[in-house]
Image (cartoon, helix red, strand yellow):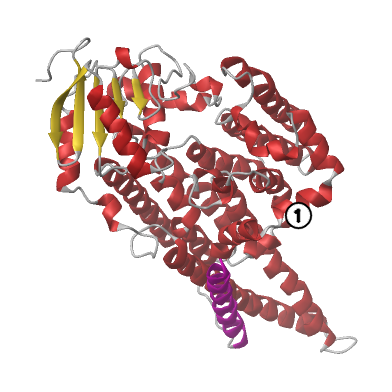
């Protein structure tokens, strides 16, 4: 952890030192022509989308995707497209996804699954969703900045943002859909298009049950900042009511345990949802101590440093972000406050819009200070024409200088963060092995072709997404009734999650299955073991 803080500190020092040097040397940032800026951004967006989709598909095809969660979502959509809405046997203790989450926007993929039932549909859709989140950010940056070069630099930094790249490379999650819905919601609200804002906010609300608080904050802003009672009030009330209803009643009703399953992540704060809420309110210092633990400070810095800390100056955006940020930081699950998982996705647009606002505030505040100094240096009663001329020259010169400095901060911070903490090409976190189709993977893919499409299957976690387009599939070792299973496929070299002692427990489990007289070894090759139930299935062709 100290190394991470040192890296972030050095990166920020270099970025801000470059900005200071640009200001001292009066470096000016020329503004790119509008058409050229738009062309560069759109080409970059297309390239980014292709890169995201390609890497995600290569990772999946080389058997590095997992049952959690690409396999689960693929089976949900496969079943939903065939009339079994939101059902998934992979959620081993429940018959329906609704016992875990409520995410109606997933059904937007059903028409695509009518045409092609394949997990790659989800990976491509996720890449498009994450890329489209950049569009409103660029439009708003272009609107708020008089220099299109600065707007372009800020928007392009989205394509190097580590947290977004990790969302894409960590299988598929419904949280990815929150990025465009959040981004468009903020943009339409800030530009006064409140009908479109309401539609996007409702789509955000339907993305996941715990996003209702975020929607409520959007509604409050529309209500208080923009005086939009007709839109803001229903969203402000409806968002939090929906989340409360979902986690206290709707999901527990579909869950065999009768509770919201993720309530356990906050059990240290209280025995029930009400206890948790009361303890947060009555013991604020304890909550702050938890939030300001070092791993959580590191997480927040990893979100802010790629933008050079500029979101900190976007003050009016922070009330939107704080409830969601607190929700993540208070969790007992370290994955909730890690940029390598999907949970940061809704915060990404907020920080970028905050950065746009921060840039504007810094430049405007400096205009005021610089103008005051310039006029005072002219004496008590300068000639009006002289004062106007000096003021105009000073403001134009100062704008270009500050713009160059801010652009330097963003560019250096974005590129440095990508190299140090990103998972993409040429970054330190890039692992080429995750995208290589090895001979071992080819053997596994060939074995899977021998399993009938209508067979019930148990498979190891990283094999599941290749087989999840079927009515019944379980992730080994979380199995259903073994007598109902047609085939079992295991891989000695594969991911053995969730075993506590992978090597010892794996071989014990394999020997137990070999000893089961209902199953015979259909194929055994290169560490793979394919077993067939002789009571329920015929030999593979």
For the C terminus, which image quadrant? Answer: top left
From where the camera sits, is residue 467 visible?
no
**Image check: 63 left or right of 135?**
left
**Image check: 125 left or right of 272?**
left
**Image check: 164 left or right of 465?**
right
Q: Residues within 10 Å of mark 1 (few under 14, many from 20)?
A: few
- Given residues 210 and 332, the one toward you in this image is 332
Q: Callout 1: helix, strand or loop?
A: helix
> Which quarter of the picture shows residue 14?
bottom right
Residue 283: percent from left, percent from top: 84, 45
Residue 259: percent from left, percent from top: 64, 22
Where 394 sits versus 81, above or below? below
- Given residues 224 and 84, the one toward you in this image is 84
- Which residue is denoted by mark 1 in the rendering? 289
> Which quarter of the picture shows residue 108?
top left
From where the camera sits, is residue 133 visible?
yes
- Name the residue at 44% across, 56% down: 159
Magenta stretch, overall SS? helix
- Given residues 180 and 260, the one toward you in this image is 260
**Image check: 208 left or right of 44?**
right
- Name the residue at 49% across, 69% down: 411
Does the magenta-highlighted stretch encompass residue 438?
no
For the N terminus, which image quadrant? Answer: bottom right
Q: Which stretch appears magenta?
A: 1-24
């Amino acid at each position: 952890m100290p190394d991470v803080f040192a890296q972030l500190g050095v990166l920020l020092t270099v970025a801000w030192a470059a900005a200071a040097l640009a200001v001292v040397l009066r470096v000016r940032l020329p503004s790119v022509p509008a058409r050229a800026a738009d062309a560069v951004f759109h080409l970059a967006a297309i390239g980014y989308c292709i890169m995201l989709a390609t890497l995600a598909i290569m990772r999946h095809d080389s058997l590095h995707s997992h049952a959690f969660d690409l396999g689960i979502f693929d089976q949900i959509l496969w079943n939903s497209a065939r009339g079994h809405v939101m059902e998934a046997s992979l959620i081993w203790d429940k018959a329906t996804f609704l016992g875990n989450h409520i995410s109606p926007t997933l059904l937007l993929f059903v028409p695509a699954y009518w045409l092609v039932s394949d997990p790659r549909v989800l990976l491509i859709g996720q890449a498009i969703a994450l890329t489209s989140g950049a569009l409103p950010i660029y439009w708003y940056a272009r609107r708020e900045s008089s220099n299109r070069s600065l707007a372009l630099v800020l928007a392009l930094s989205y394509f190097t943002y580590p947290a977004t790249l990790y969302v894409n490379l960590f299988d598929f999650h419904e949280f990815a859909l929150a990025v465009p819905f959040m981004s468009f919601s903020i943009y339409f609200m800030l530009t006064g298009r409140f009908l479109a804002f309401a539609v996007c906010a409702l789509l955000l609300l339907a993305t996941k049950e715990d996003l209702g608080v975020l929607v409520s904050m959007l509604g409050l802003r529309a209500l208080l900042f923009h005086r939009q009672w007709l839109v803001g009030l229903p969203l402000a009330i409806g968002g939090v009511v929906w989340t409360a209803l979902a986690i206290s009643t709707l999901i527990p009703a579909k869950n065999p345990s009768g509770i919201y399953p993720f309530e356990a992540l906050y059990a240290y704060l209280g025995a029930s949802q009400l206890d948790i809420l009361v303890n947060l309110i009555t013991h604020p210092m304890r909550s702050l101590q938890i939030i300001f633990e070092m791993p959580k400070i590191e997480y927040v810095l990893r979100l802010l440093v790629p933008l050079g800390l500029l979101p900190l100056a976007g003050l009016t955006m922070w009330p939107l972000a704080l409830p969601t940020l607190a929700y993540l930081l208070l969790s007992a699950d370290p994955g909730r406050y890690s940029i390598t998982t999907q949970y940061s996705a809704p915060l990404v647009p907020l920080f970028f819009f905050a950065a746009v606002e921060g840039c504007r505030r810094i430049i405007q505040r400096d205009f005021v200070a610089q103008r005051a100094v310039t006029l005072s240096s002219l004496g008590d009663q300068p000639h009006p024409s002289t004062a106007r001329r000096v003021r105009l020259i000073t403001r134009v010169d100062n704008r270009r200088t500050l713009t160059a400095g801010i652009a330097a901060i963003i560019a250096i911070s974005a590129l440095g963060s990508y190299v140090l903490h990103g998972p993409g090409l040429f970054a330190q976190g890039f692992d080429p092995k995750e995208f290589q189709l090895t001979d071992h993977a080819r053997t596994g893919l060939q074995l899977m072709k021998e399993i009938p499409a209508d067979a019930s299957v148990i498979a190891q976690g990283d094999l599941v997404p290749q087989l999840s387009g079927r009515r019944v599939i379980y992730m080994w070792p979380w199995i259903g009734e073994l007598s109902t299973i047609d085939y079992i496929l295991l891989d000695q070299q594969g991911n053995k999650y969730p075993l506590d002692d992978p090597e010892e427990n794996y071989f014990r489990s394999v020997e137990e299955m070999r000893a089961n007289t209902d199953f015979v070894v259909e194929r055994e090759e290169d560490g793979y073991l394919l077993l067939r139930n002789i009571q329920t299935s015929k030999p593979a062709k």
